[in-house]
Amino acid sequence: MNDEQLLRYSRQMMLPEIDAAGQQKLNEARVLIIGLGGLGSPVSMYLASAGVGHLVLVDFDKVDLSNLQRQIVHTTPNIDRPKIDSAREHLQALNPEIKIECIDHVLDENELYDQADKATVIVDASDNFKTRFALNEASVKTGTPLVSGAAIRFEGQVSVFNPLDKGSPCYRCLYNEDVATQETCTANGVVAPLLGIIGSIQANETMKLIMGIGETLQGKLLLMDALHMEWNQAILKKDPNCPVCN
């Protein structure tokens, strides 16, 4: 690690839980981020600034004016540009030392499994159940930890699913494919700072997984009510009849 890197990451390397060894693990990590919207924005920005060495960004949308209320990795001059181009430009400006790989289309099953297998951690920053279920299957089949987040209106949730621990539940243990609601921010709205809070927690959990420090949200679902500023936590158990992880 050179002098510039030591200075760039000095504040987090001062923490004994991280130190130079933890920073090196971040530098060597590869994180797959699905979605560069309200959650993917803070996730990608914090992981880039913290020194995660290789980010793989997946999104096929273009920046829209309505995105800018909450998708903070994008700016007004980038309206109508592909989100991956807008995000890459911002992230490289934050930290030109990291590698950023961009994918501008929906991953088919083989591509998804290949990317999941290469990743140290998968971050689900998507906004629909179909994608979340696909990411969960890829996580289970490749043994790659999955950090999941969701936010709508004033409500957010975060959890960690770690198939490396055979006792850990997966996302499919929490939700089945008969989920009737397909609520989105577009249809129901969302308060802007909520995405930053949930996305920041996802980034923090990702870093902890990479460095192997602390206690993650594995087996727990962290719930936030931003309107009343209340936090709750639910214990998740493995479903013995889960069609994915069993």
Image: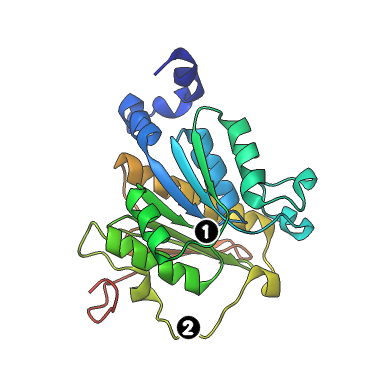
Relative to residue 224, is residue 129 depicted above or below? Answer: below
Task: Examine the rendering and report whether any part of residue 224 can be seen.
Answer: no
Q: Compare residues 119 and 166 and report the one nearer the observer.
A: 119
Say what secondary structure mark 2 lies in. Answer: loop
Q: Earlier in the sequence, mark 2 or mark 1?
A: 1
Q: Is residue 165 left or right of residue 170?
A: left
Q: Compare residues 85 and 110 and report the one nearer the observer.
A: 110
Say what secondary structure mark 1 lies in. Answer: loop
Q: Quadrant of the C terminus?
A: bottom left
Q: Is residue 241 left or right of residue 105?
A: left
Structural crowding at the residue carrying mark 2, measured as other residues with C-alpha within 10 Å and reported as few (<14), some (14–19) or many (≥20):
few
The mark found on residue 125 in the picture is 1
Q: Amino acid at mark 1?
A: Ala
Image quadrant in which you'd find residue 233: bottom left
Q: Compare residues 8 and 62 and report the one nearer the observer.
A: 62
Q: Position of residue 128 (x, y in %)?
A: 54, 71
Q: Is residue 171 left or right of residue 104?
A: left
Identity of the residue drawn at 47% across and 42% down: 55
Task: Examine the rendering and report whether any part of residue 95 can be seen.
Answer: yes
Q: Amino acid at mark 2?
A: Val
Q: Are marks 2 and 1 in contact (CB under 8 Å)?
A: no
Identity of the residue drawn at 49% across and 32% down: 98
User: CA–CA distance between discs 2 and 1?
Assistant: 19 Å
Q: Position of residue 118 (x, y in %)?
A: 34, 48
Relative to residue 179, is residue 237 depicted above or below? Answer: above
Q: Residue extending furthest left?
A: 166
Structural crowding at the residue carrying mark 1, measured as other residues with C-alpha within 10 Å and reported as few (<14), some (14–19) or many (≥20):
many
Return the residue at label 2.
179
Q: Position of residue 121 (x, y in %)?
A: 37, 50
Q: Position of residue 91 (x, y in %)?
A: 59, 37
Identity of the residue drawn at 65% across and 68% down: 185
